[in-house]
Amino acid sequence: MPKLTFPKNFIWGVAASAYQIEGAWNEDGKGVSIWDTFCHTPGKIANGETGDVAIDHYHRYKEDVALMAELGIQAYRFSVSWSRVMPEGAGTVNQKGLDFYDRLVDELLDHKIEPFANLYHFDLPQALQDRGGWPERQTAYAFADYARVVTERLSDRVHTIITHNEPWVTAAAGYFDGSHAPGIKDPLATFKAMHHLLLSHGLAAEAIRAAAKKTVKVGIVLNLNPVHPASDSRKDREAAYRMDTVLNRAMLDPLLKGTTPMQEFAVGKMLTASLIKPGDLEKIRTLDLLGVNYYTRTVVKNDPKFPVVAAVQIHPEGNEYSGMWEIYPEGLYELLMRIWKEYLTGPNPPFPPSLEGKGGAGGIGPDLMITENGVPVPDGLDFDGRVRDERRIRYLKNHIAQVQRAISDGVPVKGYFHWSLMDNFEWALGYGQRFGLVYVDFETQKRTIKDSGKWFADVIRENGFEL
């Protein structure tokens, strides 16, 4: 059978986030985050569930790292809880909180697993939200100071620090439709949050590089979806352009071009002059690693009633769907080719001098990695204690094959991180969606490696797989 193989130094990893796995929500001096508040508000989370305990990773991290080592995982992208490290978001540092991540990093290194530290994965300290949250510019400066604190402690052993996971989701789900914490529905606040999140990346990058004890790569992780029109009509094609601008270009253009498409929308045009200060875009355009989180494409049709983009998502008939999205592997190849051609080797480079020679894009831009990809499957233990998640294995084969296809066509993708290592708390959906390579019994906290986990271990060992 034909075999897909990957470059010699390709990195195979898994990812997770603090609130979704740690639990210990009020232990050892941790402050309250917006997700603690949101989950404790009746009606916000499916079945009234919370991340108070989650999968108890805070107490079981050694067991979980041992599971990674058993699977041969080479790298682990974990997030740091800001409110665990700085309970009020600024000022006092909680040493016990930092000590946990210190122990986690040491445990990873003892098992020859490379740590990728992610500073923010949706969990803003509630004290900062009380002062306005991400729509306030001051939050970006508080984030930079938090980045400095974490860097000073971990950068002697952690060589990649990611500022944000999916800043678009932070802004849109948190401040536009209110489905995520802090649960606000305000288009003006959304545009402000988007800019300040990106600004905080630039400010944090400065702080990280200044505080790093050794050379550290600074990255950001974006959720990106190819956007397709529902038909070939002019109105649907224009709707797809608007949706792509908000969903993809709003993040990619500032980070990789030093420009913003915000003014293409009435609300953005109204805000741009007061929101974007001189020098902001120059600060934002700095990164050594671009992480791509891919799950699905977005198909849209024109709809004047929908605010801002005048477009609404549709779900094409006849295609395969998970419990959350359409399954569309080809979109991953499309996305990687677009980033490479339009942003990393297209007419926009050269990059600023600070980026030259630091990345994988011909020496002129950031490294490129898949930092999340996975599928929710209604897994269960069979009579013999085995989890036969064949659908996930098929999903992974089809998507990883698209990564290899992009590499074969010249895109230097450096690694692939599966989401996620273990089943965990899936935000507003509670515990109903299982993404893990490892099954977790949420009552007993028992971990069981699924068939997909064993398959992924084989992929890592062989650096590829048979089609």
Image (cartoon, rainbow, N blue to C red):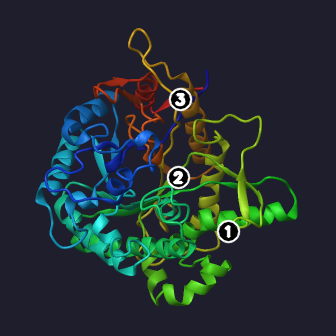
Left or right of residue 303, residue 56 in this image: left
Residue 465 percent across, percent down from the top left: 52, 28
* Discs 1/3, front: 1
Q: Residue furthest right?
A: 233
Work out whether 15 lies above or below 465: below
Name the residue tied to disc 2: 412
> Where is residue 399 drawn, in percent x and y?
58, 38
The three-letter code of the residue at mark 2 reads Pro
Disc 3 to disc 2, C-alpha distance? 26 Å
Q: Which amino acid type is marked by label 1?
A: Pro
Decide: few, some or many residues near mark 1? Use Cα within 10 Å; few <14, some 14-19, many ≥20: few
Residue located 54% across and 33% down the image: 396
Contact check, label 1 and label 3, Cβ < 8 Å: no
Q: CA distance from mark 1 to mark 2?
A: 38 Å
Mark 3 — residue?
392
Q: Quadrant of residue 310?
A: bottom right
